[in-house]
Image (tube, rainbow, N blue to C red):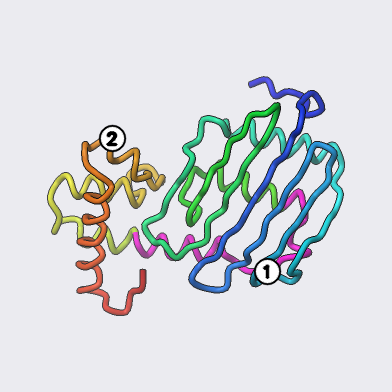
Amino acid sequence: MIIPDFKSVRQLTMTLERTACFGECPVYKLKVDGKGNVTYVGELYVKVVGKKRAKISLDKVQELFDAFFKVDYFSLDDEYSAMVTDMPSAITSITMDGKFKQVADEGRSGPQELVDLEDKIDEITNSQKWTVPYDAVADAAAKRKSVEEYVKEILPDLKPQEQEILKKRVGLEDGLMHGLDALCKEFGVSRIDIRKIEEKAFGKIKERHKDFKF
């Protein structure tokens, strides 16, 4: 893949937004432009609430620009949704030459390359100096692992198609949590049908593990 020099791109902007969760997840936004200007806006559960500005080198801008291309960002889905809905989302975007693309990743359920890109933006901008050290990665990973294990337990209680849909939804087959729209198209069902399968599965899990919270 040939990655262009970012200096040849007009109106370059790369962003990351981390959203709220059920707990105390840091909520903030980061924006990096083609001149290396970094804008941070902290909202909740962060060291610094409000706006801060910083500067990164042009080499770092190129490194971040390269990361978007390496993940083939424009070919990603617009949204990756998790079954557990109280986890934080990471919303990334890039604007270049008038072209805009945004990807919402709920609970780090997208491809690993996307998750790495999200973390790369934090790393290059050194956002930790403004945010509260909180291991949302470990928390989300542990919660997802629990869901996977519980789903495995109740799969035999479901119909064959329900099993296949739920396995793809949770990511049991390939590690990717497939989105609602993709599953609707693949199985010829509606979003409501899939939500009913999730509710049925969660109900069965709750019967066996009354202390488990979704």
Q: Is residue 149 above or below residue 59?
A: below
Q: Residue at x 83, y 55 (%)?
A: 53
Q: Are marks 2 and 1 in contact (CB under 8 Å)?
A: no
Q: Residue 32 or 152: which is nearer the viewer? A: 32
Q: Residue 173 or 26: which is nearer the viewer? A: 26
Q: Which residue reaches farthest top?
A: 2
Q: Which residue reaches farthest bottom?
A: 211
Q: CA distance from mark 2 to mark 1?
A: 40 Å
Q: Residue at x 17, y 44 (%)?
A: 161
Q: Residues within 10 Å of mark 1 (few under 14, many from 20)?
A: few
Q: Residue at x 33, y 44 (%)?
A: 173
Mark 1 lies on a secondary structure that is loop
Residue marked by disc 1: 133
The residue type indicated by label 1 comes to Pro
Mark 2 lies on a secondary structure that is helix
Residue 36 highlighted magenta (yes or no): no
- Quadrant, the N terminus: top right
Residue marked by disc 2: 185
Q: Position of residue 138 (x, y in %)?
A: 54, 64
The residue type indicated by label 2 comes to Lys
Q: Which mark is residue 110?
A: none
Q: Is residue 46 above or below residue 12?
A: below
Using residue 156 as the reference point, say whether residue 44 is left or right of it. right
Q: Residue at x 48, y 54 (%)?
A: 106
Please identify the dominant SS of the magenta region.
helix
Residue 127 highlighted magenta (yes or no): yes
Q: Position of residue 18 (x, y in %)?
A: 60, 57
Q: Which residues are magenta?
A: 123-147
